[in-house]
Amino acid sequence: MELAITRGTDPGGNKLLSVMPRYTMSVEDMTDLVAYLKLVGKDLDPGITEDKIVLGTAGPTKGPLADISQASRAVTTAFFDELNSQGGIYNRRFEVKFTEAAETPAATRAAMERWLKDDEIFALTGIVIAGSEKDLLPLMADRGVPLIGPLTLYPETGAPLNRQVFYLLSGVEGQARAFVEFAASKPELKNQSIAVVFSQGESNSRVLQAINEQSKKDGFAMPRAFNYLSGQFDPAFAVKQLKAADCNLVLFLGGGKDVLLFMAEAEKSNWYPSIFVTGAGSEIFDAPLGFSEKIFFSFPTSPADQSPEGVREFSALAEKYKLPKQHLAAQISAFSSAKILAEAIRRVGKDLSREKLIQALEGLYEYQTGMTPAITYGPNRRIGAMGAYIVRIDLNEKQFVPAGGWVSVN
């Protein structure tokens, strides 16, 4: 430190002597000081301080999705606890907060809106929103809160684009598109007429639109639509109509019970079209044997996507934090979503904001989570892995048989 002496006079002509300390700074110190003053001189987004980032996750604690929500929450919390044990990111540690879904989608939205404000949540990840998409997703845009990896079968990707929401994998729409793309690549399928059988509802209507668009792109004629009220499916009438229309490629968007009734009725007519199924479980192995090798499923991920490094990382986290043994698919989704969020935060750097986080996410290209297909986002792309794996069902051996590799849909 040096002393700076300044001489002068006041307005009355009296002499003045001013003595002030003068500090000498290096260029590096001055750069750090300027950066700090810029940081403290601006308004930070909610949930960010100099040493902390507040994240949120949410889901039901009652009902059929409660266990999935609990597993997703456990993985998300464990992932960021592990990051904290390593010092966080840019000396910021993470705090993960949870809020419970209410009994109705509207009540869930109201509760989440209060929670986002009161708890100052910077971003959300790994939330279970199935059934509440129409209420919760617009809230992200209204509040400007980034959401990475919501668990849903029906991603909202239509216009106008919701910039705040980044999905991990294709939902039913993307998987149905992948099947049409797959069929177009197979000589035995590409010249068939397509029918879409679906229970009435907004979600399935969107899937039908996606199938129509993909069919046109891949050179198929416009698919024939056959819809019915949920709980009122008439398999005999459906078979009669579609067989008469010579539709030998059927995309069935109804439940597992309905598709089994459809195939049983088709067998009576000695009619065995190829069928793509979205809504059946293990009961599908009870289908008539004449449909063996003619029933197709799609999966957004495969064990082939899991790298040795990714498996080691996930397994170590599961062991250290005693993660649940159930709902592995949901855990992998939550793990991968948290990893993507952390990577985007690293790419932004110390000067973090919600807008810069969104821009960093939009810059991810073929990012390897180690547990999913490569993830790519962009200004107009909000599904990280666009496509699916297609498998056949061997009814004799009661097992899935790969029908090809990854089918990409752009």
Image: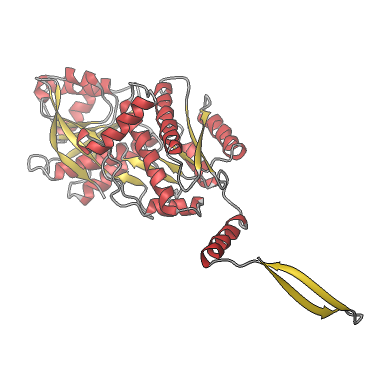
* Display coloring: secondary structure
On the picture, is 71 further left or further right than 214?
A: right
Identify the image quadrant of residue 133: top left
Q: Position of residue 232 (x, y in %)?
A: 33, 22
Q: Is residue 226 visible?
A: no
Q: Nearer the viewer, residue 283 or 288?
A: 283
Q: Nearer the viewer, residue 41 or 338?
A: 41
Where's the N terminus, which quadrant?
bottom right
Q: Residue furthest right?
A: 12
On the picture, is 56 further left or further right than 2?
A: left
Identify the image quadrant of residue 183: top left
Give above or below for 285 relative to 349. above
Q: Residue at x 44, y 51 (%)?
A: 358
Q: Position of residue 262 (x, y in %)?
A: 21, 23
Q: How many numbered marks, from 0 up?
A: 0
Q: Position of residue 125 (x, y in %)?
A: 44, 38
Q: Is residue 235 visible?
A: yes
Give above or below for 177 relative to 153. below
Give above or below for 238 relative to 407. above
Q: Residue at x 60, y 40 (%)?
A: 117
Q: Residue furthest bottom?
A: 13
Q: Residue at x 17, y 17 (%)?
A: 286
Q: Nearer the viewer, residue 81 or 397?
A: 81
Q: Nearer the viewer, residue 343 or 358?
A: 343
Q: Position of residue 276 (x, y in %)?
A: 20, 32
Q: Residue furthest left?
A: 187
Give above or below for 143 relative to 392. below
